[in-house]
Structures are given as C-alpha cells and as structure tokens.
Amino acid sequence: MTAFRVAVLASGTGTNLQAILDQLQGRDGIEVVAVASDQPGAQALERAEGAGVETGTFERGDYEDREARDAAIGDWLTEREAELIVLAGYMQLLSPSFVERFRHRIVNVHPALLPSFPGLDAIEQALAHGVMVTGVTVHFVDEGVDSGPIILQRPVPVPPSRDLDELEAAIHATEHALLPEAIRLIASGRVTVDDSSRVVRIDRE
Ligand code: GRF
C-alpha cells in the first residue's frame, strides 16, 4: 500500500507539526513528505529537518505578490505529490487560486470553537468575551478567514483562574490530539464534504 502523503505549512514554533511527526509519521499508512514555511528562521523547519523531512522556504519578498508566492508553494507541493496540506500555525492568508487548486485538501487548526472567535488572538478574544468554554476546531480551508467546513471540534473549559497561560496550555494540548486525529481520519478516506451544505461527514463505522 502506498503511503498517504501529507505536507505541513508552518510559520512558528511548530508544536503542532511535532505532534503530527510524533503521532503519525510512518504510521497508519501516513507519511509527512514536506514542510514549508514563509519564515526562514521558523523552529518548525528545524523540527522537520530533525525528522528527516524535506523543507522549503517561501518568503513573501522573493515573489511579486501573494498569488505568485502561493503558486510557487503549490507547484512545490504538487511535485512532492502531497495529498493533504496541513496548516499548523501558518500565519499567512492563502490566495483564492491556491484554495481552489487544493479544494478540500487543505486543513487548518484553530484555537477556538468556530464560528466563534475567528482570526488572530482567538484565545484572548474568548477570555475577553467572558466565555466559560472554548476549544479547538480543525476545518477545511476555504476563501474566508477560518470559515471552511468543520471536521472536528473539542471543547476546553476556561480554568477558574481565567489565566491566559493556563488556558493556552490546555488549548495547545487539545490541538496536539485533535489535529493528528483529523489527519488520520482523512488519510483513511473516512471524511467527505457535502459541497452544497458544506457539512462534513465522518464514517466512524
Ligand atoms: C496554534 O495555536 C494554532 O491553533 C494556531 O497557531 C498556533 C501554532 O502553534 N493556528 P505551533 O506553531 O504549532 O506551536
């Protein structure tokens, strides 16, 4: 059986990438084949190299515009025959043509229960709003900001202290379980998207 080929885009520390490498690499028929970043110094690239995964850097300044940069990333991923593109702390908006090219083949992890608190600083937004429960969402990427079809969600209670660091730690721990779980489900062919309703169905047998 040929492996299901996963690529990861990351801008920062890459703890979600590390969770994917630790939990999925070479298991359940999954292979992480490439990691790309917009940030040449991203710790995520070091983690990939440490795991023997090929890396690429695509700095915005090296391309005429976002469209051109995204086309280069897309070509690089296609050459590596990536079947799924995972955004793990990738802090750039992808151009609509990239989203169209890889429709329902790009997933993102977001630190809130969407559609609540999309965009940046989702954990801070949730605390400022006074919620008692927030959580993590894994969703397909569409042309909007954190607006694509939802694959998995898991709640995380806000601790009584309402301390940002404590909540962040709980959310990150949940991300590190939920994102690999979603990738495993997709790789096993059990996730389908209804195009008209945008509802995701998971065949859990
Ligand atoms: C995560 O909190 C993720 O939800 C958000 O960016 C953060 C990335 O963290 N999109 P890391 O780089 O995986 O450590």
Image (spheres, helix red, strand yellow):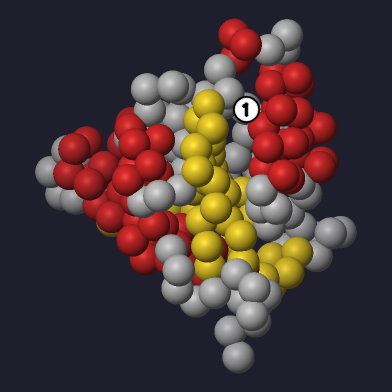
Q: Is residue 175 above or below residue 77?
A: below
Residue 98 visible in this rendered orientation of the protein: yes
Report the residue at 66% width, 48% height from top. Answer: 80
- Using the rendered image of the protein, determine whether residue 202 is visible from the camera's viewpoint: no
Q: Is residue 82 left or right of residue 174?
A: right
**Farthest-out residue, left:** 161
What is the quadrant of residue 49 in the picture? Answer: top left
Relative depth, front residue between 165 and 56: 56
The yes-or-no answer for disc 1 within 8 Å of ligand 1 is: no
Q: Residue furthest right?
A: 196
Q: Say which residue appears at 73% left-offset and 9% top-offset.
A: 64
Q: Residue 157, image x and y in percent?
A: 28, 56
Q: Tag 1's secondary structure?
A: loop
- Residue 177 location (% of width, % of height): 36, 63
Residue that lies at the very extreme toward the bottom in this rendered image? 205
Callout 1 amino acid: Leu
